[in-house]
Structure formats: C-alpha cells, structure tokens
Amino acid sequence: MKIGIISDVHCNLPALLRALDEMGEVDEILCAGDMVYEYRFSNPVVDVLRQRGIKTVLGNHEEVILSQDGQRMRRDGVISPENLAFLNSLPKVLETRLDGKRVYMVHGSPWPPEKEYLYPSHPYIPRLAKIDADVVILGHTHYPMIRQVGGVLVINPGSCGEARDPRHDFRLTYAIMDTSTGEAVIRSFVSPDEGRGWGEETAPQETEEGEGIYGRE
Ligand SMILES: [Fe+2]
C-alpha cells in the first residue's frame, strides 16, 4: 500500500495541487495539520482535503480558528459551513491501521508542550520509540525527516506549502510511504509560485524531483 503524506499547506493551493499531482496514484493520503493560517483561511485548500477524503489532524493554526480567538473568523462567514464542520470533526491525534501498520499522527508533539517543534535534533525524537505504533507522523517544523527509532519509523513530510528548511534550498516537500517495505522517502519540488507572489497560479515549471535526497536520517 502506498501512502502519500503531506503537512503544513498553509493556504498554498498551487503547491498543494502540485504535490498531489506529483505523488501520483496512492492508496491513502494523510495530512499532519496546518492546512491554513490562523489569520487567513483558504476554503479552496480545505475543500481539496475534505473532498479527497484526506485524513487530517488539527494543527495549531486550525486550533486557534476553533478557539475563542477564532470566533470572529468563524462568525464572519469566512469559512464555508462544510469546511467549518470538517475542522470541527478533526482529531488532535489520529491512530489508525494501514495495511496492518499501526500509524500514529500528531501535528506537533505527542507530549506536552503540544506545540513543541520536534526538529531532527530534538531530544524527544528517540523517545518516539516508546509510542505504541509502527509509524509516527509529525508536522509543524516544516523540516522533512525520516528516521527509524527503535521499532518506530518517524516521518515528518516537511511542508508542501511554506518551505522553511535551509538545508535543501527551501524546497517544498511531501513523503511517500510503502507499507509493504516499511520504508518512506521524501520528495521535494519547487513552489509553483516561487518569485511570483503568494498563491498566484503560474505556468507549469520544470520540476526538479528530489526523491530520496534526504534518505534515512
Ligand atoms: Fe504548525
């Protein structure tokens, strides 16, 4: 079974569509949260995730929208009723089985503080081996990572909307996991709107596929 994994779209519709297009045929897609910004919403981005049945967890930005602080955004009709219902249906943690693999997905950290950024060098990374799962999926850092810790394969797909990782020229990323081999790869691509302004649709560019460039860290 082939699983596509995305995270931290942050309202970037052209990049989301490119990631979904480039990953090709997959059996399931997971999203580790932060589809949008707490101060800016994108119904088209959430429409794509909702309509494609992408299993998603709440990111910190969605949590703000659903909190007291997001009252005005919810009240002013910025969010379509379908998308608000979708946000309200999302769990903070998703625990599921895919092709027999126990998958645990959370946006930030499984332990308090939940908004901790579990960068590749964070001391919590080895602790992820203690989670009762075969695969742990994280988001939030925008730093892609694939690492085996004990019996747990840790995957952070990075961000397919707002690149923040200087290690790889700020390219956008997503992950593909193959449940039959138990392995995952990071694929990177250039943002469709690079240098042309935020979120603007542009003509298709040459894509420099970076599959496997991160390898197993
Ligand atoms: Fe986040």
Image: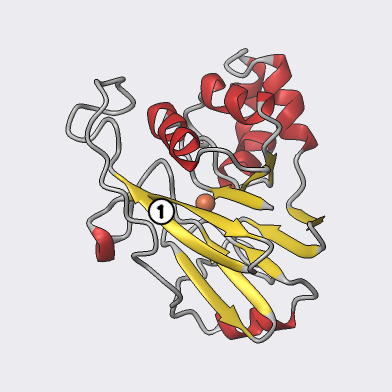
Q: Amino acid at mark 1?
A: Arg
Q: Is residue 26 left or right of residue 160?
A: right
Q: Is residue 135 left or right of residue 38?
A: right
Q: Where is residue 162 drawn, in percent x and y?
A: 37, 44
Is residue 124 in sight in this rendering? no
The residue tagged 1 is 187
Is residue 137 in sight in this rendering? yes
What residue is shown at x 73% (from left), y 29% (from top)? 86
Residue 209 higher or lower than 126, as above or below: above
Asked if the beta carbon under badge 1 is closer than 8 A to the nearest atom of ligand 1, the reply is no
Q: Quadrant of residue 101?
A: bottom right
Viewer-proximal residue among 8 and 157: 157
What residue is shown at x 38% (from left), y 57% (from top)? 211
Q: Where is residue 166 drawn, in percent x and y?
A: 25, 62
Are there few (<14), some (14-19), or many (20+) residues within 10 Å of tag 1?
A: many
Residue 201 higher or lower than 163, as above or below: above
Q: Where is residue 56 drawn, in percent x and y?
A: 68, 43
Q: SS class of the residue under badge 1?
A: strand
